[in-house]
Amino acid sequence: MPLPLFALAVAAFGIGTTEFVIMGILPDVAHDLAVTIPQAGLLVSGYALGVAFGAPILAIATAHLDRRRALLLLMGIFILGNCLCAIAPSYALLMGARIVTAFSHGAFFGLGAVVAANVVPPRKRSQAIALMFTGLALANVLGVPFGTALGQAAGWRMTFWAVVGIGIVAAFALYAWLPRGITSSGAGLMQETRTLGRRQVLLAMLISVLASASLFSVFTYLTPILENVTRESPHQVTWVLLLLGVGLTFGNLLGGRLGDWRLMPSVIVIFSFLIVVLGVLTVTSHIAWLAGTTIFVWGVLAFALVSPLQMQVVNEASGAPNLASTLNQGAFNLGNAAGAFAGERALTDGVSYSHIPWIGAGLAALGLAFSLLSHLLDRRARGTEHDEPSISTTPELMAAPYSQPAE
């Protein structure tokens, strides 16, 4: 792994850990701050909203900084936010600290994806984005279980101090290994905003929402599915979740390779298999070993969509990709909330846990439909450009030479 991508992955690991570890220490937080579990659960929603609404604000605020300085500034906000979480004396201040931390999340991944795509040759851009997101996938495999164990053993505040330590290491890595002089696209705010009106950019963001909603409509309720349908013990559930994390990590790397090979055709094929696997899960969830196998394959397919979809946004917003790339992170988080809400409504209306995967399959089917539409529009556009040779078909971003790390 090139050192700049390793630095971005370390930062992604820290950000992913602080996003998801709160679910593991929720009872400890609720008890210590004298609030109910549902109230403490709003810390998850508050973080997601902070990502969705804070990311474009920071993307605009850092638009004129070179990308290295912007990422270091965002990591500084991340470290500060987690320090405030660790010392927050009340629920309200902890909520505020979580939102401050979340502001850096979307902007970091959005700008980080653009930087990752520019420090490698053009043929490896999607793989570079996938390598950065490996840190996020590993956060679910390693960061969350260890962070939860640390919080249960030494108090939930110690978990946030540990994340602060990861953030400091990441900041040093970014300072040492990111190439100097990575300038922004040079596009002004109006040009960045105009890219959001491009049909293919909007379609890519919508597909990102649906992909994430499909994942979280099932992921949010996976533990009760395993406990009530598969009849797994809490200890066995932990191992299944670890297996899922391994699947997410493998899928992320696979998606990077597929995205560099054939981007939208790969997305279409992945969605097609995802629909089938989620349908199969409604049957295999009743048998422990089959459920584990299906969940692993589901994790591979679900996370294989992440880097290709992020790359699609960067490609289609070429010339002014920073705001669009950042907003796509908000789109993923909007999908997180929408998927969890869809699952909650289904359960409230009497749908059984064993049938919840059909919700994910339905959302994946919508993602497939819009992916087919996007691919059709892209093929038509390429045909038009082929008929008009005076029009360049090479996006500005893809034509830009990649940078090498400074010695």
Image (cartoon, rainbow, N blue to C red):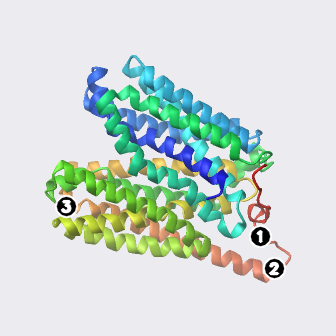
For numbered disc 2, what is the local secondary structure?
Answer: loop
Residue furthest front in the image: 407
Residue 145 percent across, percent down from the top left: 34, 44
Is disc 1 placed on a helix, strand or loop?
A: loop
Q: Which mark is residue 394?
A: 1
Element assignment for label 3? helix
Question: Residue at image x 14%, y 54%?
Answer: 228
State how far apart marks 3 and 2 are (Cα): 53 Å
Amino acid on which disc 1 is placed: Thr
Closer to the N terminus: mark 1 or mark 3?
3
Residue 392 image offset from top left, x and y in percent: 81, 72
Q: Looking at the picture, which amino acid does disc 3 mark?
A: Ser
Res. 169 image quadrant: top right
Amino acid type at image mark 2? Glu
Q: Position of residue 191 (x, y in %)?
A: 76, 49
Position of 254 with respect to 121 (left or right) is: left
The local crowd at label 3, few if under 14, some if 14 to 19, many if 20 or more residues have their Cα within 10 Å, is some
Foreground residue, 367 or 138?
Answer: 138
Residue ID for mark 3: 354
Residue 388 is marked as 2
Seen in the picture, residue 272 relative to 89 is either above or below; the reply is below
Residue 385 sits above or below residue 356 on the image: below
